[in-house]
Image (spheres, grey):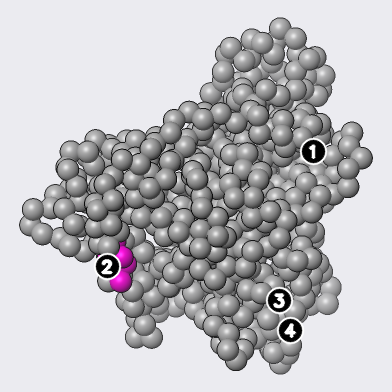
Amino acid sequence: MATSNDKYECKVRINDFILSSILSDPEASSLVGSIDNGTSSSRFLLITSAGKILSTAQVEYDQCFPSSSPYNEGSSCAGWHEHDPFAIWDSVAVCIVKTVEELAKHGLDLSIESNNSIVKAVGITNQRETTVAWNDRTGRVYYNAIVWDDTRTAATADAIMKENKQPDVAPQDVLRSKTGLPIASYFAATKVRWLIDNIPELQRDLNSPDEREHVRFGTMDTWILYMLTGYRRNVVEMDNNERLAYQGGVFKTDVTNASRWLFMNLETMSWDESLVQAVCKESNCWGDSKGSGTIPLSALPTIVPSADYTIGTITGIPCSEEGKIAMKRVLVASILGDQQSALFGQSSFEPGMAKCTYGTGLFLLMNSGENPMQSTQGLLTTAAYQIGKRIGSSEPISPPIYALEGSVAFSGSTINWLRDRLDLIDSAAETETLALSVASNENMYLVPAFSGLFAPHWRPDARGCMVGLTASHAKAHIVRAALESSAYQAREVFEAMARDSSIDLKELRVDGGATANKFMMQFQADILDTPVVRPEYLETTAMGAGFAAGLAVGVWSSLEEIGKMWKSDMTWQPTMAKEERARCWKGWNKAVERSLGWIDDDN
């Protein structure tokens, strides 16, 4: 039974010049695949050994924003954000199948086993923290995946803080010394806690001696890997059209994704039972055992290095044509959370190198080397990557590399808000022209704290606001202020990073869709007073996972070889006068102050 392709629109683009080179000598060609699962779509890339992109495929999937829920009766579900995990799997499968089918039309049939060997490995990169739970015996998924920016778990995070109070430690930081993270709704463990607090079938299985060992929690990398390496059940759907997860899949995650749970000890790179208990012990899931209950460690995926040829093997995805199978027996050789993958894709392999990705949110990461650097400035200490077992290499597994990270919830999604909610624009492409149609923001600022403020503030009580409005302001000013808000938030993180690390960052490498907006990139350079550099390929997130997979299977021999393939496309130098920069920055900080304190116990 083939994956149902018809319900998903898939755009496949092929570089004909690169394809013709491969067709001239297929046996000498090596390709690496990269699965890139984001918040709104999944993509699949094929990358050559020269670091060039042969093909890209993309499928968007629906976002679920529940207006009501039986688990929240009588209350608003504003801020809830879910994904159907099967829609995510389908989007990945369709991207792969459509790529194989389109290449076959152009003369390269990767469903033929002899040609399939051209693809040496596949890597996975994913939206981090988005969490799903399922039962590997029955295949039943307990609930939709809860997305990373979902705010329902703010109350859960508050409860965890109260349950783990320590004298002389800020409530949000009681787990930071082990995890590098504050307790916040952002992280996967708060979503696990919400699920075990609220989903009766999951509660029943966790309290059953027989079923608790079959419960599985995973972020999207784990879910995609499990489905890629698993086998279809004889019954793939229940009578009520409920779909079932595959069986026998590999249940793993990597150090970068595991470092985003609140369950992993950064020093040991392993799950820590004391952390799991701190988050889960007071759940109402445990009934009379409340205060001492916990989920078994078997419910959490095995943690592995980010690049390792032993991660798993794809069982194959049926194509539309009977008997054709895509990616059968291809190794999965890397897993990286999306932001760490972008850091890898930007070849930021040396301590002090930093990148900023402008996507749905905004994520600035700096390589901090082999020692985890605890932040005093509201940043996150996280795993950057770890190199594991490599084909043809006798080198031992390398020590993990760490990073400092500042995460901002709303960047590109602020522009989507202008388009989808306010109807101020028809597309993001309009924003540059509108922003340039006015000379300045005329002292008007937009703070997109729609679900609170993330780094470096960590203020869930903040809410979005526009301040400084006068009757002279028009649509163009609002659009300009929205673009500027991303640059201001990046500066907040950039300066916190410099204070934490005592490193004066010489440049900022950037990627993501917003880097096509020249106004925004120039304003970013101006407000930072630092050069902003855009690479030749903007697909750095997908490229990072591909590079890591290729490194694991010998397509590339070293990080140095990968680093030589990185090329700059454009650099923006700061041009803003010092006095103007100071005035703009002062106005932004006043606007942020106005956004704070909107959520309290009464609302």
Quickly name the residue at label 2: 590
Vertical placement of residue 576 versus 379, above or below: above
- Kindly indicate whether the residue at mark 3 contacts the one at mark 4 (C-beta within 8 angstroms): no
Image quadrant for the N terminus? top right
Task: Work out whether mark 3 precedes mark 2 in sequence or the reverse, and give the earlier one.
Answer: 3
Give the mark nearest the N terminus, 1 or 2.
Answer: 1
| Residue 129: image tag | none
Of the residues shown, which amino acid type is indicated by label 1?
Ala
Q: Is there CB contact under 8 Å for labels 1 and 2?
A: no
Range of the magenta residues? Answer: 588-593
Are there few (<14), some (14-19), or many (20+) residues within 10 Å of tag 3?
Answer: some
Q: Which residue is mark 1?
A: 552
Which type of secondary structure does the marked residue at label 2 adopt? Answer: helix
Disc marking residue 275: 3
Q: Earlier in the sequence, mark 4 or mark 3?
A: 3
Quick one: label 1 or label 3, which is nearer the N terminus?
Answer: 3
Vertically, is 66 above or below 35? below
